[in-house]
Structure formats: structure tokens, C-alpha cells
Image: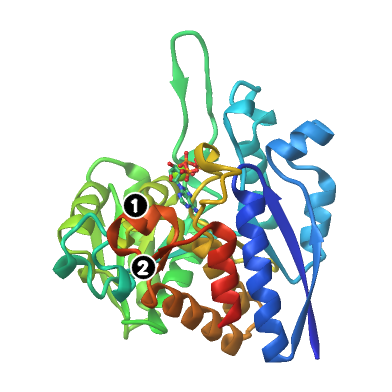
Amino acid sequence: MKTYKIALIKGDGIGPEIIDEAVKVLDAVASCCDIEFSYEEALMGGCAYDITGDPLPQETINISLNSDAVLFGAIGGQKWDNLPREKRPESGLLRFRKELGVYANLRPAVVYDELVNASSLKPEIVKGVDLMVVRELIGGIYFGEPKGRDENRGWNTMVYTREEIVRIAHQAFKIAMTRSKRVCSVDKANVLDVSQLWRDVVTEVAEEYPEVELSHMYVDNAAMQLIRDPKQFDVMLTGNIFGDILSDEASMLSGSIGLLPSASVGAKIGVYEPIHGSAPDIAGQGIANPIATISSASMMLRYALGENDAADKIDAAIKRALKEGYRTKDLAQFDAKEVCSTSEMGSIIANY
Ligand code: ATP
Ligand code: MG
């Protein structure tokens, strides 16, 4: 029997509630796939700041580097919003990604057939949507220097080097090879110099993948096309800030931000987390949708551990729960047979 070491970072807000459900499902799938998980918990975010004075204690980095993969909930909340920037939970998370070197954020946006009516768009527009946003995660304007502010000015810098663009482009093309072999690279090359380099380098990398069809789109048009005709996309390749915005937008195609997982990869250890935040407005009420996190655990099995059977089992269990009409509150207004709590949804999926 294979044992995998998983670092669990529950974080703040709904983080602990949703991670607990993912662990429940992982343990259930382990027992039928002849694998085993040993978990080690680590602190990050506001809870880490409250206990240690640092939103990203060194021990958390050590535990993560010493694991096979990191399963992460969410961090942040109003309580910590007025701290200086480097003490804020979000800066802990940015530093964490940078320390691990996970430069590629993969965000699938899939519309479950069972939920076509949950989307704010018409069913005929969203039925069958299955796209993957590949977002550069540790460069661009969130990290570029110089940055700062004084009384009258604030500034950030969008920088990409050739090397950073090459490696994220390879990720996108490799993923496209396992899918419908189409990459749409999103930039703002009509205005930004950094985007012109981006476009040139992506075009060069594309030559190594002759089977993949490459197109380019300006980010403003891409935002519109995602709503107008999302099925035109297979893989969307983007920089950090554009990917942040477009993947949140894409998530709404599926009906709830509580459904969608992500994987941050490219380094030795990957980080698997829901795309949503810590949702302080619903924390502690037992109503958060755990599916995004359970689905992130499935991505972890697939991408980090190569346990595709176990991942398939989880994906099928999620679909079955939705098909049978189980809905958490975020999805319940549409067609719920039964509104269930966070832990009920976790148990239903775990028990299939
Ligand atoms: P971040 O900056 O960390 O991305 P955010 O400010 O974008 O966070 P979220 O925490 O993602 O915000 O929450 C946005 C909205 O979506 C909130 O109303 C929240 O309650 C809701 N939400 C987020 N996650 C879930 C979930 N798993 N289940 C149900 N609702 C959720
Ligand atoms: Mg957000």
C-alpha cells in the first residue's frame, strides 16, 4: 500500500470546514484504492498571524516542502484587513506560492450537465462548457518592481521575462495536447509593451506543438467572449492579473464559485485549492459548498500523485451527488431536491 504525505493548510473563514470535507472524501477513496494518506497540518493566513505574528511561518514552508502535495483551503478576512501589507494574510499566500515556485495556476471551468440551469447564462450557451484557464502565478503586476505608494501616487509594474513566458506557455500547450488541442493566449498587446513580448514568445513556443492551434485575443474581448460564447475556448493562457479576473468570470458560467478547483504547479510540490476565497460572510454556518475543495483534492490525486483511478472516482461521485439533486445553499435556489449542509454534502460524496 502506498502512503502519501499531504500538507493540510486549512486557513481562515470557511477554510477549515471545506478542508475537513475533502479529507473525508480522500479517506473514503483511499480505502477502496489501496492507498493511504498521512496528513500534517500547517498554519497560514490570519490564523497564522494571530498565533505566530507571521501570516506565513517558516514551519509551514518546511512542512509543505516535505510533503507530496499541499491541500489548501482559503485565507483572509476583515479582521486582518488593516494590518500593514506584509502582515496581511494575502501577502503570506503570495509569498508561499513564490517560495514553492508554483508558477502555473490551472483552473478548469466545467459546467456540469446537472447544473445547466444554475448558470446566470442561458443553458444553450453554457451546456458543454469545459475550458481550462492556465494563469501565470508568480510574476506580472502582482510582483513587479517598482511598486509602492505615497500620499498622491500609487504604482505597480507589469514585468514578464522571456523565461517566465516560455515556461508558462509550455504548460498551456502540454495541457492542450491532453484536451482539444486549442490554446487562446490572452493579452493586451495593442496597449502594453509587456504583452507584445508575451505574444511573440508564446508564438515561438507554439512552433514546438504543431498539433495545437494557437490564437490570440485581447483581454477585454476575451472577457466578452467568455459570456457570449464560452464553448469556443479549450485552454486560455494568460498572465497573472488577467487570469485572476478571467478565471473568476469563467467560474460564474458553472453556477457557483463554490464548485471550481485549481492546481498550482510547475515546481516539485504543487498546491491544490478551491478558486474561491475564505468567504467570511458564510463562515461557521455550515452552508459553504465543499465541492470546489473536494474537486481540488481530485486534481491533487491526478496531477501530483498520478492516482487517476481515485481521481476519477471522486469526480464521478461529485457528478452523482449533483445528478441526484443534492445542493448546498449556493445552488439550492435552482432545483434542489434536498438542501444539504457542508458536511452532509461531503458525506454524500464520500459514501458513493
Ligand atoms: P479572495 O480575495 O480570497 O478571492 P473574495 O473576496 O474574492 O476572496 P470569496 O471569499 O471568494 O471572496 O467570496 C465571494 C462570494 O462567494 C461570497 O459571497 C462568498 O460567500 C461566496 N462563496 C465563496 N466560496 C463559497 C463556497 N464554497 N460556497 C458558497 N459560497 C461561497
Ligand atoms: Mg477573489
Determine the CA span between mark 1 and mark 2: 32 Å
User: For the residue marked with disc 2, what is the amino acid?
Assistant: Lys
Name the side, left or right, on which 150 lies relative to 58.
left
Q: Quadrant of residue 351?
A: bottom right
> In the drawing, what numbered circle is on residue 246?
1
How does the figure colour the protein chain or chains? rainbow
Q: Give the residue at x 60% y 38%.
A: 76
Q: Give the residue at x 36% y 67%.
A: 337
Rendered view: 214 above or below 229: below
Q: Give the residue at x 79% y 57%.
A: 41
Rendered view: 264 above or below 99: below
The one nearer the camera, 26 or 132, is 26
Name the side, left or right, on which 2 lies relative to 220.
right
Is label 1 within 8 A of ligand 2 (CB to nearest ligand atom)? no
Residue farthest toward the top in the current orientation of the protein: 151
Q: Are marks 1 and 2 in contact (CB under 8 Å)?
A: no
Q: Circle 2: is it few (<14), some (14-19), or many (20+) Cα within 10 Å?
A: few
Mark 1, secondary structure of its residue: helix
Rendered view: 206 above or below 143: below
User: For the residue marked with disc 1, what is the amino acid?
Assistant: Leu
- Quarter occupied by the N terminus: bottom right
Q: How far across and down, in percent of the image, does residue 185 sit?
A: 31, 62
The one nearer the camera, 164 or 6, is 6
Q: Is residue 166 visible?
A: yes
Q: How far across and down, in percent of the image, does residue 205 sit?
A: 40, 71
> In the drawing, what numbered circle is on residue 337?
2
> In the drawing, what numbered circle is on residue 100?
none
Name the side, left or right, on which 318 lies relative to 85.
left
Q: Circle 1: is it few (<14), some (14-19), or many (20+) Cα within 10 Å?
A: many
The one nearer the camera, 137 or 284, is 284
